[in-house]
Amino acid sequence: MEGLSTYILLTLFQRVEMSRRPPSEFHAMAAYWARERGLRQVPEAWAYFVGASLVDFLARQYGLPRLLRLLPEFIANWEENLEAWEPEWKAWLAGDVPDVSLGVALLEQDLPLCANLLTPVFPGLRELLPRIFTPHDLARFWQRVEGPPEPATPELWEAMRRRERTPVFVHGLGDERRKEARQPPSPPGQFKRAQG
């Protein structure tokens, strides 16, 4: 679904660019991913890039209206289809890939999650995210996190307490742990460490 929604947005706003640039350039993050990995077991952070490239690849083969009609059939045998599409998809993305090291760093370091979790302690982190264009900008983000935090106040503790369980959900724990994670958060200073 991530790929389909991203593809539709791309066709609305970048259709001409999509048709003019080689797939390895237009889908640079997916091309980077495809160099050593495939279509299965794609982490959520990469799902938009890889998924959009797969939908683009399939839409060019079938046409978007037909692809949408075939989608239920494709989903019914999803793993088998991914395996069948993977070699051709990788070949389609082969070519020169622009430097995506900054994009990869943003994904691997999960800056949006970090900024959302730490905003009460380090105000202004979210505002830095859209300004990260260079490795220097990325370093500035982490320098802010390494700097002195805001003084502890009851409001700050309350804001952090609301975020306390977020990592439990993000890491996709099993059903039993999810039930436990839905319990009300502990008071400040009584954080429970996740077992495992």
Image (cartoon, grey):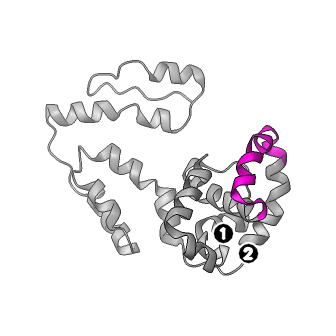
Overall secondary structure of the magenta section: helix
* Residue positioned 22% across, 33% down in the render: 157
| 6, above or below 73, in the image | below
| 85, above or below 183, in the image | below
Residue 43 position, x and y percent, is 61, 49
Instruction: Tell me, yes or no, whether the highlighted magenta stretch contains residue 65.
Output: yes
* Residue positioned 27% across, 22% down in the render: 187
Please name the amino acid that badge 2 sits on: Ala
Please name the amino acid that badge 1 sits on: Ala
> Could you tell whether 130 is left or right of 45 in the image?
left
Q: Where the C terminus falls, by quadrant?
A: top right
Q: Is mark 2 on a helix, strand or loop?
A: loop
Q: Is residue 142 visible?
A: no
* Residue positioned 74% across, 58% down in the render: 38
Q: Nearer the viewer, residue 16 or 6?
A: 16
Cα gap from disc 2 to disc 1, whole angstroms: 7 Å
Q: Which of the labelled discs sits on residue 31, or is there none?
A: 1
Residues at badges 2 and 1 in contact (C-beta under 8 Å)?
yes
How many C-alpha atoms fall within 10 Å of the one at disc 2: few (<14), some, or many (≥20)? Answer: some
* Residue positioned 29% across, 30% down in the render: 161
Q: Give the residues in magenta.
A: 61-80
Residue 79 position, x and y percent, is 80, 44
Q: Name the residue under label 2.
A: 94
Residue 40 position, x and y percent, is 73, 50
Q: Is mark 1 on a helix, strand or loop?
A: helix
